[in-house]
Amino acid sequence: MAYVRGRDIKPNAIVRRHLTDDCVGADEIADDAVDFNHLAEDVIQEASGAIANAAVRTLNATPVTMIAAPGAGKMIVVHRVIWYLDYATAAFDAAAAGDTLVAKYTDGSGTAATAAIAGNTFGGASADTVAVAPGAAAIDAATGCVNAPLVAHINTGEWYSAAGGSALRWHAFYSVVTVPL
C-alpha cells in the first residue's frame, strides 16, 4: 500500500490514462531510486522485523533496536506498531501484567513511543497473537527523543522463568520529522 500526505492509495488506483505525458512513472524510475532521503517528511514509512526467542527473553535487560536513529535534528514519530507473537513451543510463563511490551526512544530507560501491551495477556499467550499499539503522547526533553533510535523493550521484568519459546515479529508505521530547535 502506498501513502501520499497520510492517505492510502489503493493498488491499481493510478493507471497510465490518469497521468500526463510529462509525468514520471515506474518505467522511468530505477529500482531503489526513491529512498528515505527523497521522501517528504509527511510520508508515512514502514519498517518490520523479528526478534528471536532468545532476545525476547531478555528484552527488559537488553532492548532490541527496531529503527535506527534518524540523524541530527530529526525525530521518529510512531503512528502505530503491530506486534505478532509467533507462538512456537510454550507460553512465556513469567509474563506478568506489569511486564509490558513497548517501543521506546533510545533504550529501556527512554520515553515510551507507543502504548504498552500487557505482558500477561500478550506474552503469556499460548497461540499466535496480534496486538496493535498506537503511538503514545511522548513528552520528554529533546535530548531523549531527537536523533534517537526506536527500541523494543519489556518494562519491569522478563517474560520467562522456565518456559517461553516464541519469536516476536513487529511492523511499525512512522514518520521522521525535523525538530525546529
Image: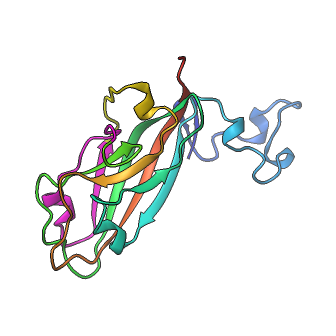
Q: Is residue 120 left or right of residue 67?
A: left
**Which color mode does the image show?**
rainbow
Residue 126 rendering spot, x and y as whole percentages: 18, 72
123, 44: nearer the viewer: 123
Q: Nearer the viewer, residue 95 or 6?
A: 95
Q: Work out whether 180 lies above or below 160.
A: above
Image spot of residue 84 (x, y percent): 34, 61
Residue 43, compared with residue 80, is above or below; it is above
Determine the residue located farthest toward the bottom in the rendered image: 89
Q: Nearer the viewer, residue 39 or 111?
A: 111
Residue 124 painted magenta: yes
Residue 92 magenta-highlighted:
no
Spot occupied by residue 38 in the image (x, y as percentages of width and height): 72, 36
The image shows residue 22 at horizontal and vertical percentages of: 88, 30
Question: Bounds of the magenta span?
Answer: 110-133
Q: Which residue sits at x=31%, y=53%?
A: 153
Side (left or right) of 56 relative to 179? left
Count the marks. Answer: 0
Give the quarter of the image for residue 158: bottom left
Q: Quadrant of residue 120?
A: bottom left
| Nearer-the-camera pick, 52 or 142 | 142
Identified at 78% across, 40% down, the residue is 16
The residue depicted at 56 percent of the width and 42 percent of the height is 10
Q: Relative to residue 10, is residue 23 depicted above or below?
A: above
Q: Is residue 160 above or below residue 110?
A: below
